[in-house]
Amino acid sequence: MGPIYIGAGGWAYLDTKEKHKLEAYSKKFNFVEVNSTFYTFPKSALVRLWRRRVPSEFVFTVRCHRNLTHKYELRPVDEAFNIFDRMVEICRELKAPILHLQTPHSLEFDGIRARLTRDFFSSTMTKDVRLAWEIRGRVSEEVVRLMEDFEIVQCVDISKEELAVESHMLYTRLFGRGFHTLYQFDDEELKQIEDKAKGYDFKEKFLTFHSLRMYEDAGRLKAHVEEGTFPSLKGPFGVDDLKRALVDAVFPCSKYRLIRDHGWKVVNMSEEMRVHVSKLLGEPHDRVYKNIDELLEEVVKKTH
């Protein structure tokens, strides 16, 4: 079984007292996906500084700038080739083995567009940098053949999607089942992600979290992969922790709205187990609770 790299989409939001967040991040995880390159073109001096701030075995991957995928739509034009060349240069400066491409829902890669994309990839493939392509829209048969022909890794969120293209490498970006990044993974979901990653016959596996609690989720999965158990949790537990999770809920409020707005959060049930708020609250309905205590009283009766 090949190595598993577990990390998150960037280090900018890491809560740390250390002066340099990237250095602090590299003490917790063995890889990071550079997210900022989707929006900006960092100078080479900054990129080289990133590489120097982390251990030699630390792994970067790089998100390709959105102009290539959203503006020029992977068409074989000079502007697109220039962007691609700069992204590959950044990968090499970081010793990053993967360049991640994300195309939007609006793009359908069949017919003429598929042929143009094939022409683009035929002029850009590199031996030292693999491409991982996250297709937000429909994965057509033309795209599957194209990815197979150029050995491009299909990137999907394995917590809710299945791969359509076989590869020797897994690259998954994990958002969960919430709205955009508004999500937190519970124990069962993290175990399922681990089982899927280990179940595939990949030489390398990259798991990058992008949920709201991405550092916590990635840290807990990394601990489970390495030690076989999740880290022990500190209280409060059960209903007391549910009260903490709902501290920003506005009452009066219906259970339907509570589940919609807060069901994605995770509650500590014991030192070894965490579950979603939605699981504790049960089926949604229109009953309106006057305050948090009225809701908690119902939950206590249901769980005892």
Image (cartoon, rainbow, N blue to C red):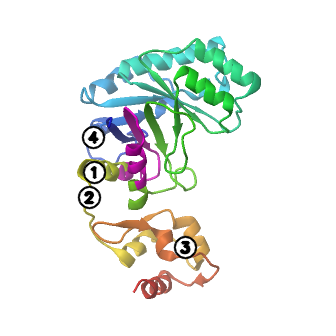
The disc label shown at residue 24, or none: 4
Q: Give the amino acid at mark 1.
A: Ala
Element carrying mark 4: helix
| Sequence-first disc among 3 and 4 | 4
In this rendering, the answer to whether 44 lies above or below 245 is above
The disc label shown at residue 231, or none: 2
Question: What span is colored magenta in the figure?
Answer: 192-217
Element carrying mark 1: helix
| Sequence-first disc among 1 and 3 | 1
What is the crowding at mark 1: few (fewer than 14 residues within 10 Å), some, or many (at least 20)? some
Q: Which residue is mark 3?
A: 250
Mark 4 or 1: the one toward you: 1
- Alpha carbons under labels 4 and 1: distance apart: 17 Å
| Sequence-first disc among 2 and 4 | 4
Q: Which quadrant of the structure image shows residue 179?
A: bottom right
Q: Give the amino acid at mark 4.
A: Ala
What is the crowding at mark 2: few (fewer than 14 residues within 10 Å), some, or many (at least 20)? some
Where does the N terminus fall, quadrant-wise? Answer: top left
Pointer 2 and pointer 1: residues touching (CB < 8 Å)?
Answer: yes
What is the crowding at mark 4: few (fewer than 14 residues within 10 Å), some, or many (at least 20)? some
- Alpha carbons under labels 2 and 1: distance apart: 7 Å
In this rendering, the answer to whether 221 lies above or below 295 is above
- Alpha carbons under labels 2 and 4: distance apart: 19 Å
Q: Which residue is mark 1?
A: 223
Residue placed most toward the observer, 108 or 296: 108
Where's residue 109, x and y in %?
69, 29
| Sequence-first disc among 2 and 1 | 1
Pointer 1 and pointer 3: residues touching (CB < 8 Å)?
Answer: no
Where's residue 298, x and y in %?
48, 86
